[in-house]
């Protein structure tokens, strides 16, 4: 059985905050402390704020391309400039939506740049994705090990829209100590027939599961998942989220 | 706190099986019976088998288009014919993958037609998606109500690949008694700033969460989720999965 519970009572996260310490001090009621095999799932905003990955609109001077895009899509040119700064390739710009490939390789709206819940920096502050989300996940994992003694996995998440389907789901943007994918391709199923396309994005399913356990309007970025089958846990940090990114050359939808 | 547990000991599902009865008789150990507000998440194969939504390859005569596609992509032309029969529009056919829009409007590989775990019908049997997955979910919900007295939500799932990311995640293909989407767009967040793109596909997150609680090679199609925030439960069956489907005209990636 899986048990999934949010970490309660976290303060607003400021730049330089020790997120691992804040979380370690607040194990979810009902789980009773962190244990080996637990997975901590954290919304990236908490990580980005702690790492100072924020930008103030007042500090941004938009360039020509940002001004043009902003005019076409009814946006603040400074905001668009920050999105472009985080973007490797702009895939689509339509109906006010910029679909970007970030420098990490994520395909998402506005390169993951977000203005909501920006309390730490004030209303004119944008929150970026962490610069190296796998590195952030590894550091948080190490810090939790140090503070609690538990060997936990860490998944850092963001809410991404999808092609073809309405709504957003939380997906992994940084992973440590958990296998991001489980590969059953080529293995036999329960009647001996080959499973041909069964290649499961465990880290993304963890991200989605955790999102169900917290309120979107409250300050619960951190969620603990207990009871994940042991085969998904890794002794080392593992390949991280990069294993989940489909190279452009293999992608039918760019 | 969310608790997620698989239904254990289900038999192989035969055509005409009373899936609701089989599940109602096996409440997951640890949860102790079905309760109001629980969500039953079921892999579609169990539903399709019970509904007789299977086809034997021996009964299929492939047409010209199926023969041509099969030759181009190294597939069995009878299998391709079944995929085409389930397809409203073929979006891509590349590298052995047919990306289809099904008659229901789902965008997925091979129109959801699957050969694995086909024990019920023998090795030359293909399993289709249910003809009306929302209807299947509503019927299962009503049957569980009748048998257990509990007002549960039902989500029927399949494993879909994604644009841009490796691996598959389980998503909803039929929904009853659960709000498929939670819409926070336009509401204020915890610091009074408008949340601009927060529109959460709850039913898809439920599908993904449930998949973590079962073994892919074992017979555990049914999973119970307990503790979902009450605001997601519906008294009536609700809009179903159709609310999750992005119309082609609004879709940037077809």
Image (tube, coloured by chain):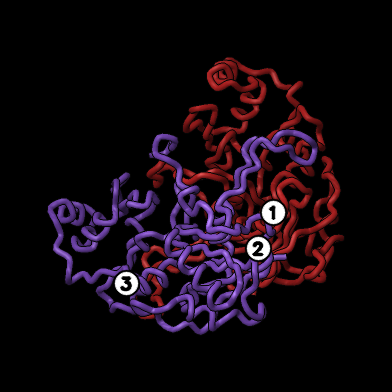
Chain colours: A red, B purple
Mark whose residue sits in front, 2 or 3:
3
At horizontal 52% and vertical 34% (from top left) the residue drawn is A99
- How many numbered dots are placed on residues in this image? 3
N-terminal of the two: label 1 or label 2? 1
Q: Is residue A234 visible?
A: no
- Mark 1 to mark 2 CA distance (whole Å): 9 Å
Whether labels 1 and 2 share one chain? yes
Disc 3: CA contacts within 10 A as few (<14), some (14-19) or many (>=20): some
- Mark 3 to mark 1 CA distance (whole Å): 46 Å
Mark 1–mark 2 CB contact (< 8 Å): yes
- Mark 2 to mark 3 CA distance (whole Å): 42 Å
Quadrant of the image occupied by residue B177: bottom right
Left/right of residue A15 with respect to residue B184 in the rendered view: right
Q: Is residue B119 above or below residue B197?
A: below
Q: Is residue A16 visible?
A: yes
Label 1 residue SS? helix
Left/right of residue A237 with respect to residue B22 in the rendered view: right
Q: Residue under circle 2?
A: A177
Whether labels 2 and 3 share one chain? no
Label 2 residue SS? loop
Q: Quadrant of the N terminus of chain B?
A: bottom right
Q: Residue A137, which numbered label?
A: 1
At horizontal 27% and vertical 72% (from top left) the residue drawn is B125
Kindly identify which chain the residue marked by label 2 belongs to. A
Residue A87 percent coordinates (x, y)? 57, 32
Mark 2–mark 3 CB contact (< 8 Å): no
Whether labels 3 and 1 share one chain? no
Disc 1: CA contacts within 10 A as few (<14), some (14-19) or many (>=20): many
Q: Is residue A42 above or below residue A149?
A: above
Q: Residue under circle 3?
A: B52
Residue A185 percent coordinates (x, y)? 41, 67
Kindly identify which chain the residue marked by label 3 belongs to. B
């Amino acid at each position: 059985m899986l048990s999934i519970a949010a970490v309660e009572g976290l303060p607003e996260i400021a730049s330089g905050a020790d997120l691992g310490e804040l979380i370690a001090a607040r194990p979810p009621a009902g789980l009773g402390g962190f244990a080996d095999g637990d997975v901590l799932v954290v919304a990236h905003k908490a990580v980005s704020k702690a790492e100072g990955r924020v930008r103030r609109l007042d500090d941004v001077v938009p360039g020509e391309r940002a001004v043009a895009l902003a005019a076409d899509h009814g946006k603040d040119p400074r905001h668009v400039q920050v999105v472009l700064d985080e973007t490797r390739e702009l895939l689509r710009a339509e109906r006010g939506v910029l679909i970007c490939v970030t420098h990490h390789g994520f395909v998402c709206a506005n390169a993951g740049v977000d203005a909501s819940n920006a309390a730490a920096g004030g209303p004119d502050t944008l929150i970026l994705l962490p610069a190296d989300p796998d590195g952030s996940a590894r550091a948080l994992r190490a810090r939790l090990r140090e503070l609690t003694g538990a060997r936990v996995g860490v998944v850092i998440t963001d809410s991404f829209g999808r092609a073809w389907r309405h709504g957003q789901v939380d997906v992994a943007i940084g992973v440590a100590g958990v296998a991001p994918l489980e590969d059953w391709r080529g293995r036999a199923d329960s009647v001996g027939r080959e499973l041909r396309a069964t290649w499961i994005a465990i880290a993304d399913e963890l991200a989605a599961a955790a999102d169900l356990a917290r309120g979107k309007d409250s300050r619960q970025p951190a969620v603990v998942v207990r009871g994940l089958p042991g085969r998904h846990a890794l002794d080392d940090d593992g390949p991280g989220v990069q294993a989940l990114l489909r190279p452009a050359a293999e992608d039918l939808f760019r």
